[in-house]
Amino acid sequence: MILIDGKKAAAELREELKVEVSELKSKYNKVPGLTVILVGEDAPSQIYVRNKEKSAKEVGLKSEVIKYPDTVEEKTVLNKIEDLNKDESVSGILVQLPLPRHINKQKVIETILPSKDVDGFHPMNVGNLSSGYESSIPCTPLGCYLMIKKIEPNLSGKKAVVVGRSNLNGKPMTQLLLKENCTVTITHSKTKDLKGECLKGDIIVAAVGIPELVKGDWVKKDAIVIDVGINKTEKGIVGDVAFQEVSKVAKALTPVPGGVGPMTIACLLKNTIECFKRSN
Ligand code: NAD
C-alpha cells in the first residue's frame, strides 16, 4: 500500500512555488500578496491562520493578517474587503471561517472580488469550475486532486465516489473528478446504501466529519482512498476512514494527520500565485 505523504507532497509543492515566486519577482518587480482576515478567537482558526502566514512567507509571498474581535460589525469587515479589492498589492483575500453569527458569511464571500477569491467560494468561481472555465478552486479538494493525480495520472473512465456534498469539499471535488472524465457518484447523509456505493469506487474521497466511517469492507481492492476528515476523538485526531482496516485493501491512502491538511495550505499559496498571474 502506498501511504500518500501529504507533508512531503506539500513541501515539494512549496519548493516549486518558491521558484515560481522568485521568477515572478524578476519579471514584474513585485510578489503576489495574500491577506487573511481573522475574526474572533476561535482556537483552530488561530492555528490555521498562523500556519498559512508561515507558509506564505516561506515561499516568498507578501503576507498580511488582519485581526478583528468577534464583536466587530459586519460593515467594518465588508469595508475592509472593499479596500483590499482595490489594493493592487493584494492578489488574494481569504476570510477565515467560521465567522461570528452576526456576520453574514455569504455576503462576505460575495464581497471579495472573484479574481482575488483564493478560497474559490465566490459563486462566480463555483460556476466557472462547474462550467469547466478557469477559476479559483477550493484549496482542500485541489490538494486531494493533486495527490490523486500523482498516484494515477490518467483518471479517465475511473469510478469515483465522493462521500459528503459540502460546498467546501464534496461538490468541488466532484467537479474536479468530472473534469478528469471520471464517472462520479456523490453520496451524503441520505444515501441509501453507502457501503454499496463506496465499494464501486476506484477512487474514494471521504469528506464527512464522522470518525472512521469508511470501513475496510467498504473499499474495493486497490482503490485510491483520500481522507479529508479531521475528527477529535478520545484516541486523538482521526479521519473519516478506518485507517488500519482500509490500508489492508487500498492501493493508496492518505493518513490523518499528515495527508490532506498540509496540502490544503500549500494549495492556498498556489491559488494566490494563480490570482497574481491572472491579474498581471
Ligand atoms: P460538512 O459538515 O459541511 O459536510 C459534511 C457532509 O457529509 C454533508 O454533505 C453530509 O451530507 C455528509 N454526511 C453526513 N453524515 C453522513 C453519513 N452518515 N454518511 C454519508 N455522508 C454523510 O463538512 P465539511 O466542511 O465538508 O468537512 C468534512 C470533514 O473534513 C470534517 O471532518 C472537516 O473537519 C474536514 N476538513 C478537513 C480539511 C483539511 O484541510 N483536511 C478542510 C476542511 C474540512
Image (cartoon, rainbow, N blue to C red):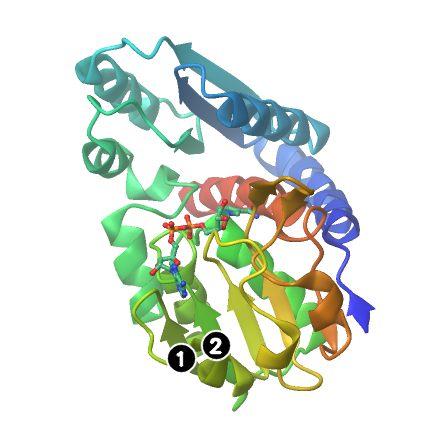
How far across and how far down the image is residue 242, in percent?
65, 63
Secondary structure of the residue carrying tag 1 is strand
How far across and how far down the image is residue 34, in percent?
50, 29
For the N terminus, the image quarter is bottom right
Task: Describe residue 206's horizontal placement relative to residue 18 as left or right.
Answer: left
Q: Is residue 180 at all visible to an observer of this figure? A: no
- The answer to whether 238 is drawn above or below residue 91 in the figure is below
Judging by the rendered image, the residue that carries numbered circle 1 is 185
- The answer to whether 85 is drawn above or below residue 189 in the figure is above
Sequence-wise, which precedes: disc 2 or disc 1? Answer: 2
Tag 1: amino acid: Thr
Judging by the rendered image, the residue that carries numbered circle 2 is 161
Question: Is the C-beta separation of discs 2 and 1 under 8 Å?
Answer: yes
How far across and how far down the image is residue 119, in percent?
42, 43
Residue found 41% across the figure and 42% down from its top: 279
Q: Is residue 278 at all visible to an observer of this figure? A: yes
Q: CA distance from mark 2 to mark 1?
A: 5 Å
Secondary structure of the residue carrying tag 2 is strand
Tag 2: amino acid: Val
